């Protein structure tokens, strides 16, 4: 994923995420809620489709016999960030009478233009550098990992409590793909990305909102949207250092891509190809979670079979 095409691909993911958030806000929620009894949980596609269908009937683009159900797959692809054409986006904007600032934000995201502190990793890679020195340590971490209908990672949300080990105004987020875009929700701003010399690892450098002195802490939340050209290995791993006091992980699968089997696993290290131990788990609502207080450095997560 490099250049303009990759930016547009991940831009569709961004726009889908933001569209979902906006439709959950009261001013837009009221429009679809009249067609649904849902009060919590995921947006009901049928109700959102009903709003779009009503608009098409009102403007004369379709006849009164048009069925909202025919739009449900289109709505689902848009909200999942799988497919969102300009025409579909403008239909949402018009049907929900979106405010100008929201409409422009969605259009910019759809085109892959970073807004609000977002950074497309592949197009922002600034050469290679050594692995940066660690200036903060993680005390607590919670991560939510989503796998999309195409069997590829779609979204990864990370929430961390960080403690400075020396005076610093940076945090370095390290991961193993450049098919990604990073946005910081709270606590800082992504400023650059680079590859770790001699490795497949990428680093996003996040400028913290405040300078930390040794022993001071801060909360940081950031999101990683993915746009893999093909599904990667069917697993999610999280390396944990010995200083982490609490770890919480969740993996969720799209209803169109539920694995045949999911196994919770523990690896001996980040370079291990096979887990040292694993056992099957059941999905509830398409997801499974774990929460532990690590007693040593470890690598935890899941593997699955389609």
Image (tube, rainbow, N blue to C red):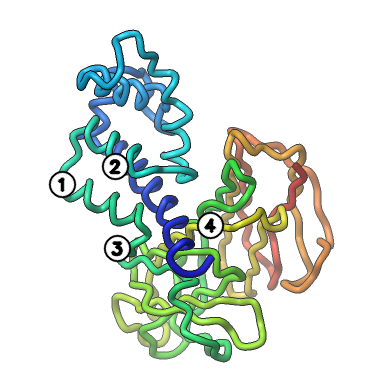
State yes or no: discs 2 and 4 in contact (Cβ < 8 Å): no
The residue depicted at 44 percent of the width and 90 percent of the height is 166
Which quarter of the image is occupied by the N terminus? bottom right
Asked whether 210 or 257 is in front, the reply is 257
Which residue has dot 2 on it?
22
State yes or no: discs 3 and 1 in contact (Cβ < 8 Å): no
Q: CA distance from mark 4 to mark 1?
A: 28 Å
Marks 2 and 4, the one that precedes in the sequence: 2
Which residue has dot 4 on it?
227
Which tag is nearer the camera, tag 2 or tag 3? 3
The image position of residue 225, as x and y in percent, is: 48, 57
Which residue has dot 1 on it?
100
Q: CA distance from mark 1 to mark 2?
A: 13 Å
Numbered mark located on residue 115 in the image: 3
The image position of residue 158, as x and y in percent, is: 48, 61
Marks 4 and 1, the one that precedes in the sequence: 1
Q: CA distance from mark 3 to mark 1?
A: 15 Å
The image position of residue 142, as x and y in percent, is: 52, 58
State yes or no: discs 4 and 3 in contact (Cβ < 8 Å): no
Q: Secondary structure at mark 1?
A: helix
The residue depicted at 55 percent of the width and 49 percent of the height is 146
């Amino acid at each position: 994923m490099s250049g303009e095409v990759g930016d547009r691909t991940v831009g569709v993911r961004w726009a889908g995420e933001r569209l979902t958030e906006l439709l959950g806000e009261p001013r837009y929620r009221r429009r679809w809620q009249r067609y649904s009894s849902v009060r919590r949980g995921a947006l009901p596609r049928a109700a959102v489709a009903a709003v779009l269908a009503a608009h098409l009937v009102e403007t004369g683009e379709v006849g009164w016999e048009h069925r909202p159900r025919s739009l449900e797959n289109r709505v689902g692809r848009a909200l999942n960030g799988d497919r969102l054409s300009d025409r579909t986006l403008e239909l949402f904007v018009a049907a929900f009478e979106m405010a100008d600032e929201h409409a422009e934000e969605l259009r910019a995201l759809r085109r892959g233009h970073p807004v609000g502190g977002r950074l497309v990793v592949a197009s922002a890679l600034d050469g290679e550098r050594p692995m940066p020195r660690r200036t903060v340590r993680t005390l607590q971490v919670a991560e939510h990992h989503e796998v999309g209908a195409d069997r590829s990672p779609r979204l990864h949300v990370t929430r961390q409590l960080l403690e400075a080990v020396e005076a610093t105004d940076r945090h370095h987020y390290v991961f193993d793909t450049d098919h990604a875009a990073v946005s910081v929700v709270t606590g800082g701003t992504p400023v650059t990305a680079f590859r770790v010399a001699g490795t497949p690892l990428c680093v996003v450098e996040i400028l913290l909102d405040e300078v930390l002195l040794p022993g001071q802490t801060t909360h940081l939340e950031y999101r990683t949207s993915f746009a893999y050209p093909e599904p990667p290995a069917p697993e999610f791993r999280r390396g944990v250092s010995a200083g982490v006091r609490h770890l919480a992980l969740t993996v969720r699968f799209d209803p169109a891509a539920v694995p045949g089997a999911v196994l919770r696993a523990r690896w001996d290290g980040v370079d291990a190809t096979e887990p040292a131990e694993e056992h099957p788990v059941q999905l509830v609502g398409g997801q499974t979670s774990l929460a532990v207080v690590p007693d040593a450095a470890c690598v935890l997560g899941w593997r699955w079979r389609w």
